[in-house]
Structures are given as C-alpha cells and as structure tokens.
Amino acid sequence: MDNLTRRRFLTMSGVTAAGALAVGATQVNWSDLMTAAVRDPLPSGDSVLVVVTLYGGNDGLNTVVPAADPAYQDARPELAYKPEEVLDLGEGLGLNPGLKGLKGLWDEDRLAVVRGVGYPEPDRSHFRSMAIWQTASPATSVPTGWLGRWLDATGADPLRAVSVEPTLPPMLAGATTAAASLPVRGLKLPQGALGEAFAALGKPSPGEERWQAQAAKSLGDLQNAVRVLGGHEAGEREDDEDEEKTKGASAGGSSQLGTQLDLVAGLIEAGVPTRAYSVSLGGFDTHADERGTQQRLLTELDSSLTPFVQRLRKTDRGKNVVVLVYSEFGRRVHANGSDGTDHGTAGPLFVLGEKVNGGFHGAQPSLTDLSNGDLKSTVDFRDVYASVLGGVLSTDPGKVLAGHTGVVDGLLRV
Amino acid sequence: MGEISERAAVRRLNDRLGFGSVGSNEGFDATVARLLGPPTVAVVPPPGLTPPEYAGKKDDKAAKKAANKQRAAQELRLTSWWLDRMVAEPTATERLTWFWHGHFATSNQKVRNAQLMFTQNQAFRTQALGKFGDLARAMVVDPAMIRWLDGNANRKGSPNENLGREFLELFTLGIGHYSEVDVFEGARCLTGWTIKRGATQARFVAARHDADSKTLFGKSGAYDARGFADLAVAQAASAPFVVGRLWFRLVSATPPSADALRRLVAAYGSERDVRALLRAMVAEAAFTDSASALVKQPVEWAVGLLRALRLQPARLDEKTRMKLIAGLRGMGQVPFRPPSVGGWPSGGSWLTTSAGVTRLQVAQLLTKAAELDPATDVQELLGVDGWSARTKAALASVKDPAQLTAVAACAPEYVVSG
C-alpha cells in the first residue's frame, strides 16, 4: 500500500470526549425515545456484532500467558508472570490477572480464545498492520474496510453499523456506504428556520465535486440518524483527559471503553436496527515499564466487557450479541531493555457471548520455533472474520473477504 | 476537470498555505510572495508556562488533582495562544507549523507538559519553511518527542525502538524504504538522549549512549542521533516521501503525476528546501485544477471562520474560548492532541454525523460573537467561490445574519476547500 493511500487509513480515533456519552442520567429517556422513534426495530432473532479494537499492539504473551513454559520465563524475566499469578485456563496457559471477569466467562464456556492469530508476512508498523486488520487485505491495499464492504454488499443504510467514536475507523468505510458515528455530545439539532436550513444543506446537488457531495451526504445522513435514533441528550459529565491512565498513548484508540459499551448496550436493548458496532480502547503501545500499564489496561478491558456481557445475556436481543476483541499485532517474545517489548507478530484474539463456543481455538505458537524472534501465526485473522460474517451477520464471507472462505471451525453455536 | 479562475486560485492559495483569506485583494503571484515571505507577527511566548507540578505520593489525591488542574490550564492557555497566532499570521508560517505538528505528531496526552509542547511547536515554527534536515535533526532530540516515543527508555545495551521506528516510517521515509535492521541500528544511534522530569531541554548522557559502530542503509560508522537523522533524510526515498506528505495535505489526495513529482523533488533538492518546494507545488497545474479539492480539517475550518468573522481568540471571552476548544474536541481535532503518532485522518473521516452537529454549534457560537453587518454578502464574507442551487435555496429562508452565516459556514462549499 502506498503511503498516500495508507494515510487515508490513519483514522485511528484517539482523543475522544467519550465521557459525554454517559448515559446514566438520561438512560431511561433514551430507551423511551428509542422505542417511540424506531419504526423498524431489529428482529429479535438477528444477531449483532460488537468489535473492540485495542490500539497499540497488545502484548499477547502477557494476555494469554504461557506461564509454565520455561522459554517464556527466560525470554522476559522482569516482565513474565509466574504460573501462580495467572488465571489458569489449562494447557499451560493462563489469563492475565487483570482479566478476572473474562475468566468467569471462560468457566461458563462463553469465552473463546483463538490462539496465534496473524497473517502471512507480518508488518510491524502500527498503521500498516492496523490497516491490514481493518481492511482484511494483507497482501494488497484496498480502499474499503471489511465491515464497510459488508455494508456495501447488504444494503446502503448507514445505521446498520455504528461507531461510537468521533472519527470513523477505516473498518467501517465501504465504497458506497459508511457506517454512522454516534455523536459524543449527543444528537441535538436546532429547530425552526436554522434547523430547516441546516437540513436543506444535506440535499444532493447535481454535478457536485466528490468531497462536497460527501459533505452534503453526511448532513443528510445526520438528519436520518436523528430521525431514527432520536435526540440523545448527553450528560454533563466531563471526562478528565489529563488523568494519567497509560504510558503507551502513541498509537490511537479511545479511552472509557465502559462508557462506549454502555451506550451500545442501550442501543441494542432498544432494538435499534444496527447489526455491527465498533468501539475501541487505546494505550497498548507500551514499550517501557510495560507490565503494570498493560495490566491496568487489561483490567479496564475486563471491567468494561464483563458487565456488558452480563447485562446483554439478560435480554433476548442481547443473547444474540457476539463480541470480537483484537489488536493489530502482538509483541516480541523477548523483552527489550526497558522492561517492555517491541512490535511483534501473532497474538490471541477473544470472541465472547452466549452464541460462542468457549475454549481454545487454534494452536498455541511455539516459543522456541520462532521467525526472527517472532511467533509464527497459526490462524489467519480472516478465518475469524469469515466465521462472524457467516455466523453473526448471516453474510457469505466470500463477498466481503475477496473469496477467502477459511473459517474457525466450531467457534459459534449454530 | 478544468482550471479554476484566478480568483478561485487565490482563494485556494489562502486556504492551503494559510488559514483562509486575510482580506487583501491580491493577485496570484502577490499572494504567493506574501505567503512564502518571512513571518510578520512577532512570537511572544504564551504566558504562564512553568514546569508542571508533580504530586508527591501516589495516594495524595488532592495534590494529584491540583497538578492535573494546573497542567490542563496550561495546555488550554497554550492551545488558545496557538489558535490566536493561526488567525493573526498572514504568511504560510503558522499553516506549515500546523502541518509539521500533524507530521511529527506528538500528543500532550502522554507528554503532559505544555512547556515541552511549546518548545516543540516553536521548533516547527522556526523551521516551518526551512530545511527539512534541520527540522528532522531537531525532532530526534526534541524533549516532547523523546517523552512521547519512549526515548528515555532507550539506552546502550537495551534499545527501545519506538522513536527510531516511527522516525523512519512516519517522519522521513515511509514503509518499504528501510529494513528492520535499520530500525534496530537507528534505535542504537538515538541512545543516550534523555529528558528529566521538570527539565525543559533534552540532555545527552554519554554513558547511556552506544558509541560503537552501526550499519544503516548499508553504511557503517559510529553514528549518533544527528547522524541517524542525516542518513535518513539523505536517502533517495526521503524526498518523494516528504513531498508526498505535503502534497497530500496542501494540494490533493490524488498523488502528483510522475513528471510533477520529479519537478517537485528537484525543487526540494539536496538541501531539502521546503520553501522552494512549496513554490514549485503551487506552480503545478494540479494546484489550480478543480479536481484538487480537500476537506478542511476542523482546526483549519474553525480558524478560517474566525478570520472571516474578524474574531481573534485572545479577545473572545473566556467562556466562548473554552466552548470553541470544546467544539474542536467534538469535531475530533484539538491542537497538541493528535490521536496517534500517525497524525490526524483526512478527507471523509471528518464528515461524520457527530462532526456535523458540533460544526453547527461552533458556527453558531462564533457568528453570535461576531459583529455582523446585515448588509454583508455572506458568500463574500466567507470567500466562497459560489453556492450551489441547493445551498442558495437553504440560505434563502434564514433572515437573522448570525444564523445565516452559521448555516453558510456548514455548507459543503465552505466545509470543503474547493
């Protein structure tokens, strides 16, 4: 992919006013509004995909930890977790101590750990690798994201996919349709002459230049989104961006995953006809003093995801939700000299929900049979995408993944 | 597509090399001369930037809160100060300072020190239209950059590749023009440079530096940070990469033709002269082609609107200024807070539903603060080439001058630099 094309994919949203999404005070009204406004609720049998992107290259070996493997202990003595520190999953592997809630889901057989996920000829650039994951095109550059192509293939309604971020992740951009992004400050538009004039700017104008046409279309989409979703009045809460949450802040992504997922849960429960949601957590670009920072981030992931899944399993619609958690690459097996790890290759990926067959999928990469110091991947990430495209979004994966048809067998309950 | 009129070309020059019109009636050549001339507004450092206070013990919540508050206040002051300069400076200096900030993208989210962000910002300004090599050399030892990309953790015997890698990938060469060995050896070159807590300058600690021979791009020597920067900038791939980055943000998302790229690389030259490159860029036919439209980034849109409305952020009341910055945040772009080391997105990424809501709010905020003459022609005021029938119809029903101007500022013809 040339750099100009690549740069168009650098839409990794990071600094976000996610705190403004706080649904607490307005949650009831939100649901009420939703119910009244939604004319076309999601059929209760339709399943929903929630994609969680961990920006920055999460260290997979310290997430699903081969603590019993001497090669692991030798490679990163300062960073390694001892067998008694991790949450045992069997087969010599254990979850990071920050992932207590996920361990509970594992015990209930609702957490799938797909091991050794990557792609051929891995790229260690955050941006190139994230573009590869988001476009699902490892070998060549394509201008569309995998869920964007799903939108293209299955109808042009942007509300069928929603991003809870201020800028659209490339994953959700198709050739003819892009997903809607949910406003961080709430969808509130003025009434009267001003509101009418603003709405009128969204009409297409024949022969208009491409970007101007897209600017008009985005305003049209906005009117549409307000009509269907209703005016969600955001709370007044400010998020304190200055609070030091992470030392690995340089590779994009949002904070406040819990707030994002709260909002998504509200939308799902209200029957909004959205089939795919995108949320993210940033800060995984840790190169130094990694252990504490990563554990804190994984704890945030855990304390956001666990209540989300617990909440959803109580409703019929929620039982059909499948969550996919991934990062652009793992880290080197060996620690660097500053108690961190540098960019590497394969890593584990989580799939969770009531429709998921828990347990291990895919083979654990060897820690001794390495490729230039890096893990050799055992599962192509497109196999996972194909599984959720078919099993969650009921779409022929070949249409979206350029003919790729491999799947992870038995990942989902049919 | 065809060539745009001279009037539209002047408007485009002001959009792309500046932050919109400064209200003078110049022809194309005079506009180029002004924009590429020396800066005219003196740099008075932002007031009240002091080393951040640090809370002592980790469990001292009150002290931590106070320190956070102080840092936030300083960042806000710095951001307002820069927005003010963007509005005031009639040359390309601030526009290019803004470009370099997106190129060497560094966020105060991790740096957490407005003073260091200012130091870096000032380096961008000094070298804005200068020699790229000087800028690159300044950035490998820039204190904010060192903190941002873990330079402190990079020492002899235990390299940390973060800064070296991003320097090659994002700042000088682009993917495919360096090897993993170059990244590793580059990290060794950068060992020894540190930034102490509370310090305003980076410090070279010889004992932490790996002075042994390294091999980069097939050449061996005891390279240091400066040597690393020089080697990278001298690579043949560096010129087309940097030229491409500037073209992408200032001219068009469509890359230059092979012929144009050759001319631009020649103008940039072995001296890596940014001013000469920009002069060549605006002389290219593609610069005045109607197809070369760009979506304005939120900061560019807001600063252009402030200019058109004759509003200077420093003279706005505190509350309006806060709301302006909150609006930029709502649109997804605040200076000193790029989302990642890759900088900000471009094009359609800014045209989201949420950005649309916030854009109208910011436009209303600013048009209310401005003194608008009801007789003013809004097309003239905003310097738009012309309205589509759609926008004319939309504007026809709004009578109040502030509301009319706010809606016009959200029109596709203004949101996009045609």
Image (cartoon, grey):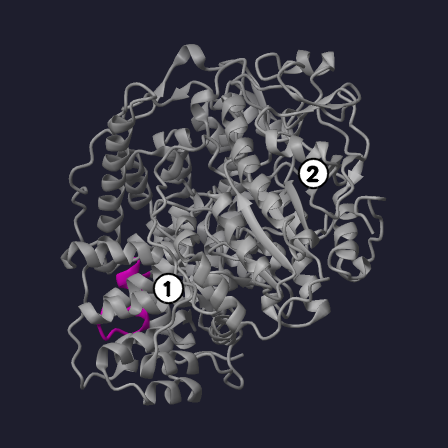
Percent position (x, y) of residue B327? 33, 58
- Dot 1 falls on which chain? B
Residue A106: which disc? none
Q: Amino acid at mark 1?
A: Thr
Q: Which residue is mark 1?
A: B358
Within 10 Å of the Cα at label 1, are there few (<14), some (14-19), or many (20+) other Cα atoms?
many
Q: Can residue B265 be seen here?
A: no
Q: Quadrant of residue B287?
A: bottom left
SS state under label 1: helix
* Magenta highlight range: B18-36
- Dot 2 falls on which chain? A
Residue at image point 37% right, 64% down = B358
| B9 or B99, nearer to the observer | B99
Percent position (x, y) of residue A215? 47, 72
Distance in Å between CA atoms under marks 2 and 1: 36 Å
Residues at marks 2 and 1, common chain? no
Q: Can residue A53 be seen here?
A: yes
Look at the numbered discs 2 and 1 and tell me whether their residues touch, using CB distance below 8 Å.
no
SS state under label 2: strand
Q: Is residue A409 left or right of residue A331?
A: right
Q: Amino acid at mark 2?
A: Leu
Residue at image point 51% right, 58% down = B263
Q: Which residue is mark 2?
A: A349
Percent position (x, y) of residue A39? 58, 75
Q: Residue furthest front?
A: A314
**Within the magenta stretch, is there residue A29?**
no
Residue at image point 62% right, 29% down = A59
**Within the magenta stretch, is there residue B27?**
yes
| A381 or B115, nearer to the observer | A381
Q: On screen, A49 above or below B218? A: below
